[in-house]
Image (tube, rainbow, N blue to C red):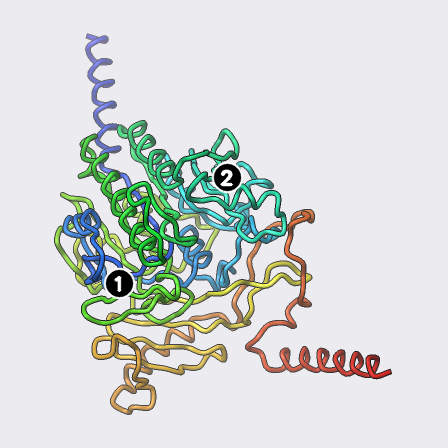
Amino acid sequence: MLLRSLLIIFIGSFTLQAREASDKPNIIFVLLDDLGKEWLNCYGGENIKTPRIDQLAAQGIKFDNAYSMPQCTPSRVAFMTGQYPYRSGWVNHWDAPRWGAGYYDWKSNPSIARTMKSAGYTTAVAGKWQLNDFRIHPDAMVKHGFDDYCMWTGCEGSTDKKHEQTSTQRYWNPYIHTKEGSKTYPGEFGPDIYNQFVLDFISENKDKPFFIYYPMTLPHGPLVHTPLEPDVKDKYAKHKAMVHYIDLLTGKLIDQLEKLQIRENTIIVWTCDNGTSGGINNKMNGREVKGGKTQTTENGVNTPFIVSCPGLIPEGKTTKAIVDFTDMHQTFADFAGTQLNSQYTYDGKSAKAVFLGKEKSDRDWIMAMGSKPARMTDAGVENVYYFRDRVVRDARYKLFVSTDRKPEKLIDLEKDPAEQNNLINNPEYKAVLDRLSLAIETFPESDADPTYAKLSTNPWDKKATFPSKLHKQGHPNQVEKHKVKETSKKKKKSKKEKK
């Protein structure tokens, strides 16, 4: 009887654990690199075929109003931390492997991977990172909370030319960092390696909840041919080939989940870090759309955003609910049944109810800000502005806010998707202007600079070219002082030259 009772307890315990595990859906966050909506059929993109991405959208919810930031670093850190750039400090773009010094510090910042690990998830990341230099921190990904990783190292345009010759390669003959170290893969195509790593990780962890961050390197430049289309030559042919390859890799991901019979317990969030690179334009729903990367216009920050999990997420739906990248941290924590680390302040709100079919999000507005490189000063990495210009919007209207914290442009996106007509002085829209302007009051007076432990100087570090704080724009008195000093220096130099 004792043995029978123990057996019943053991079986009951195992069944409970299995049920609890299955109640936690797997989550895969797929992040493209420089791809706007105008290059996807399901969003009305023309001159391109993306059948597997379209299939993903048909099997889930397609968002019309999801915001990233306008460039790589602000978007990626906003996703990882659940914080707006003004709080995390990563307002401007910064490539740690390229410029050294500043980096995403695991001791000072929250991490969505650590949050998911706290909920019992096995975690992995594959693709582009660029927020840490693996020469200095080879185990950075583990410290950020990832159990396994397969990363393009980054290092384009570095002053360390010897390292750059190998590490800059993200596509053909890629230089990739794993737990075994960094090395070149001769003759191979990087996106295939990152994708296969993800597929293998899914196979190895299919019986327990997993979280995968899959930041694809595609289709960011340099534009290249792909294994599918080896003979493409010009800019647009290469770009299209790279988009076709994204579609192929997306299909492989879907097929793997279906093969392992876990597609209905895996949430795929498929999106991009910002709009298409400048100079690469396409028609969308009959309208010419320019590549909007680095811009806060909709082609720069209103990113493609698809959420799919048949049986859990409604299928074949398009929503106007507003979400942005800061929401993902809280959303994934809610699906995982865990709490965020109370040590930090978060800006995002959970979009779980929206993912499950609710028509309207709990947000009053979403926001995008940040672009262009930060600057190295004698105090370290600092932002260019005291208060960076930004945009806030609801499901229909959008407000541009200047560096002096004032509304400067109001757009009715429903009537004016090209953002040409400024309604800020139109009395009919005063209530809309007043409502969106309330968001400005919630912003701190000055944007934070990145927080990280200072490291010893490396030969490839970007040199300080500005004094701390005085280089910044947005505070007239500070800027004026800096200008006076610079003018004085120029006059002295001019006198010496005359002598």
| Residue 69 coordinates in the image, percent (x, y) | 39, 62
* Label 1 Cα crowd, 10 Å radius (few <14 / some 14-19 / many 20+): many
Helix, strand or loop at label 1? It is: helix
Q: Quadrant of residue 149?
A: top left
386 on left or right of 336:
right
Whether residue 260 is situated above or below residue 265 in the rendered picture: above
Q: Disc 2 residue type?
A: Lys
Q: Is residue 326 visible?
A: no
| Residue 235 coordinates in the image, percent (x, y) | 36, 58
473 on left or right of 398:
right
Distance between the Cα atoms at labels 1 and 2? 37 Å
Instruction: Identify the residue at horizontal 43%, vertical 37% (top origin).
Output: 150
64 on left or right of 233:
left
Instruction: Identify the residue at horizontal 23%, vertical 42% (top origin).
Output: 251
Foreground of the two, 22 or 406: 406
| Residue 457 coordinates in the image, percent (x, y) | 69, 49
Whether residue 428 is situated above or below residue 464 in the rendered picture: below
Whether residue 103 is situated above or below residue 485 in the rendered picture: above
Quadrant for the C terminus in the image: bottom right
The residue that mark 1 highlights is 38
Instruction: Identify the residue at horizontal 21%, vertical 75% (top origin).
Output: 414
Foreground of the two, 174 or 55: 174
* Label 2 Cα crowd, 10 Å radius (few <14 / some 14-19 / many 20+): some
Q: Disc 1 residue type?
A: Glu
Helix, strand or loop at label 2? It is: helix
Residue 143 is tagged as 2
| Residue 277 coordinates in the image, percent (x, y) | 39, 62
Mark 1 or 2, which is nearer the eye? 1
Foreground of the two, 79 or 46: 46
